Image (cartoon, rainbow, N blue to C red):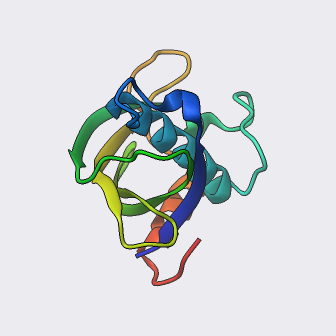
Amino acid sequence: MVHFTYLSEVHFDELDALGLLHHTRYLLHLERAQQKFFEKLLGVDDFNKDRDEDIYVVVHGLEVRFRQALSNPGLIAVDYTISRIRSGGVTMSFTIRHPEKNTVYCDGTRTLCKLSANSHQPTPWTPAFRAALDTCSSNSDL
């Protein structure tokens, strides 16, 4: 399985009144990591909606388990691993953790569905992106 890690910065203003990272902010860091993961798979430095039709996705399912509160600004590591690939969907397991310690803040799964930009209906991945996703069954890291 391919393992993708993205280091994301938690800023002071993301902490709530208790001094903890609010649960909704974890999803923002998942989005940032997903963008970088897909950019890596596409072999591009940034998304272009006219060029990269496979970026048009919606979240179909999300399961999150909060393990330990995050109470300090700084770097977190977001790890993604592909769990299942379908013709126009992908399920990814994720872990949000301290980048240097064994502390896991949350983990879970996230399922995406690719939509047609024109019809907003589910549609298959492009052959090139599907091939890139299929490489995720190898034993290397991205």
* Residue in front for this viewpoint, 79 or 14: 14
Does residue 120 lie above or below 89 as drawn? above
Residue 22's x, y, as percent? 37, 31
Quadrant that contains the C terminus: bottom right
Using the image, determine if residue 38 lies above or below residue 1. Answer: above
Q: Of 127 and 43, which appears nearest the observer?
A: 43
Regarding residue 139, the answer to whether it shows in the image is yes
Residue 42: x %, y % from top left: 66, 53
Identity of the residue furthest to the right in this view: 45
Q: Position of residue 46 (x, y in %)?
A: 76, 42
Q: Going 45% across and 17% down the picture, which residue do you hit? A: 120
Instruction: Say which quarter of the image contains residue 79.
Output: bottom left
Q: Which of 60 and 124 is in front in this view?
A: 60
Q: Is residue 63 left or right of residue 13?
A: left
Quadrant of the rendering where the N terminus is positioned? bottom left
Q: Which of 58 and 109 is in front in this view?
A: 109
Residue at image coords 51%, 66%: 99
Percent coordinates x, y for residue 19 in the rendering: 40, 34
Residue farthest to the bottom? Answer: 139
Query: Is the residue 73 above or below the residue 98 in the image?
Result: above
Q: Say left or right for 12 vs 18.
A: right
* Total numbered circles: 0
Task: Inspect this view and state whether residue 56 appears.
Answer: no
Q: In percent of the image, x 43 and y 59: which residue is there?
A: 80
View extreme (front): residue: 18
